Image (spheres, helix red, strand yellow):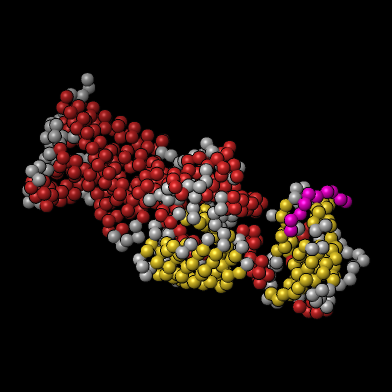
Amino acid sequence: MLLDPADLQAIWLTVRLAAIVTVILLLVGTPVAWWLARTGSWAKGPVGAMVSLPLVLPPSVLGFYLLLAMGPHGPLGWLTTSLGIGPLPFTFWGLVLASVFYSLPFMVQPLQNSFEAIGERPLQVAATLGASPLNAFFTVALPLAKPGFLTASIMTFAHTVGEFGVVLMIGGNIPGVSRVASVQIYDHVEALEYGQAHRLAAVLLIFSFLVLLGLYAWRPNPKKG
Amino acid sequence: MELQLTLRKQQGEFTLELDLQASGERIGIFGPSGSGKSTLVSCLAGLITPDSGQILLDGQPIFDSSRRINLPSHQRRIALVFQQHGLFPHLTVRKNLLYGYQRCPATERRIELAEVAEVLEITDLLEQMPETLSGGQSQRVALGRAILASPRLLLMDEPLSALDDDLRYRIIPYLNLVSERFRIPFVFISHSLVEMRLMADQVAVLEKGQLAGLVVPEELARQRMGQSSTGYINLLELGIPQEQQGLLAFPWAGRELLLSGGAGTESGTFELSSKDIILCKRHPDAISARNLLPCMVRSLFESGKKTGIELDCNGSTLVAEVVPAAAQELQITPGSTVWAAIKASAFRRL
C-alpha cells in the first residue's frame, strides 16, 4: 500500500467530515437559498453577504471567531457546556460545525441560482392547481432544481475536503479526531517526509480534478435546467 | 357564475381600481396592454393581494380586506391558463394533466382524464415529455390540466397570444368545447376583439386600471370600428367550396362568395374587414371586385369618424363602413338597398 495507516485514517476522517457537512448543509442551506431566491425583504442583502463571507475571509479570521464563540466563554460554548456536551473546539463535531459555516456559500449559491432560474411561474401554476406552498416546493421546485442540488453538493463536499486553515484553528491536529488529509500533508512536509506528502497530495489532486471534471462534463445544459 | 368585485391595487405608478359585477359562463376582459388585465387575473387567482376591497365568487368571499379574508391560491379552486403553457418540464403529459386532479378533493372531482384527453385530442401524447410537444399541443395540455382540477372558475390569460396566427383560431373551438362540455365558467382575457367575440358573451373593458364599460362583444366591436385600423371584422361561416374560374366559390347565405386561391378547401370561419366592402347605390356594370351582393340596409351606427352600416344579405349580416358624407350622398337609410362589392382577396381564414 502506498499510503500508511495514518494517511488512510486522515483520508477516512476527511471523507466522513465532508459527507456529514454536505448532508447538514443540504438541510440548512436549502431553506436559506429558497428564502434568498424568493424574498423581497430588505434583509436579503445583509443575509446574502453574510452567507458569502467565507468566500473572501481568510480562514484564520473565520476560525478565530468560531473558536471564540465555541470556547467555554463564547455563546456556543456556553450552550454546549450547559447541554452537557462540553466545549466543541478540538473535537470532530467542532470541526463539523466550523466546516458548515466555512462551506455554506458553496451550498447556498448554486441552490439560490437554480431556484431563481425556476422563476415564479411554475409555483404559481402549482398553486392554482391546488398545491400548498410546501407541496409545490417538493413536487415542483425540488425536481426542477435537481441540477443545482447536484452541483451544490459536489462543490460543498469538495470544498470541505480542501479546507485547511479553519481546521487548524478549530480542530488542531489530533489524529483520528481532527487531523484531516490537508493537515496530514502539512505534517509530512514539516517532518520532511516528502515522499508521503507527495502521495497524499497526489490523492487530493486527482480527487479534486475528477470531481471538477465530473461537474463540468455532466452538468446539464443550464438552459434546460 | 357570478363575480362581484371591488378592489384597489397599486403597483408602482399604476393603480387598478375596479368595481365590477358580472354574471354568465363566458366573461371576457378586454383592454390594451398596461390596462390592468393581468393584475386583475393575479388578484382573482390569489397570486397577488389587493390593497383593499372584496372579491365574491358565487356570493362567497375569496378576498375581503375588511373581514381579513384572503383565501390562498391553492384553496380557491380557480385554475389559470397562462399565455405560456407553463407545463411542468419534469413530468410527463399524463402527470401534468393529473397534477391538479390529484389535489382536488375527491368529492369535488367531476371530470376524468380519459374524457378530457379525448376532447382535446391529446390521448396519443400522454406518455411524452412536454419538451417534445408543439406550441398548440402544449397549450391544449395546459388547458386539460386546468380543467381536470375541476375548478369553480377557469381564468384564461391571453392563452392564444403566444401561438402562431393559424394555430390560434384552431384552439378556440377546444376552449369553447371544454367549458361547455364540462360546464366550467371562464373568464377570458385578451386584447383581441376577434377573440372576445369568439369566446365571451359579456366583456368588461379595462382602460388604465379602470372599468370603461361592460358590454356584449358585438357592441364593443362596433364601438371600436371607427378608431380601429382594421375596422370592424365580419366573421363569416363559409361552407365547403367548389372551384370556379380559378377561384373558390364558398356557399354563404344562400349564394356563393368567390375567394382567391390559398383560402383552403375546407369550410370554416373567415374574417372580412368592414373597410374591404365597397357600397354602390346601383349595380355597377363593370367592376373588378368578384363579389357583388344585393343587400338591404338594416341600420346605421356612428363610430368615431365613420358610419357603420349593418346590411342584410339574404338574411345574413354584414357590417360595412363609410365616411358620413358618403352615406349622405348615397342616401343610405334603413330599408334602402345597396350593392356590396367585395374583392376575392379580402377574406382571411381564421
Q: Is residue A79 left or right of residue A30?
A: left
Q: Can you give x and y, in whole percent of width and height, for residue A47 in the image?
A: 27, 56
Residue depicted at x 59% and y 50%: B181
Q: Is residue B241 magenta?
A: yes
State whether residue A201 appears in this view: yes
* Figure check: B87 above or below B224: above
Quadrant (top left, top right, bottom left, bottom right) of the C terminus of chain A: top left
Residue A73 is left or right of residue B111, and the answer is: left
Look at 54% across and 54% down and name the residue there. B184
In the rendered image, residue A69, in percent from the top left (x then y), is placed at 13, 50
* A127 or A110, nearer to the observer: A127
Q: Using the image, determine if residue A87 lies above or below residue B29.
A: above
Start-end of magenta stretch:
B236-245
Query: Which is nearer the eye, A31 or A92?
Result: A31
Quadrant that contains the N terminus of chain A: top left
Q: Is residue A198 left or right of residue B295?
A: left
x and y percentages locating residue A55 in the rendered image? 27, 49
The location of residue A203, given as percent across then percent down, is 26, 29
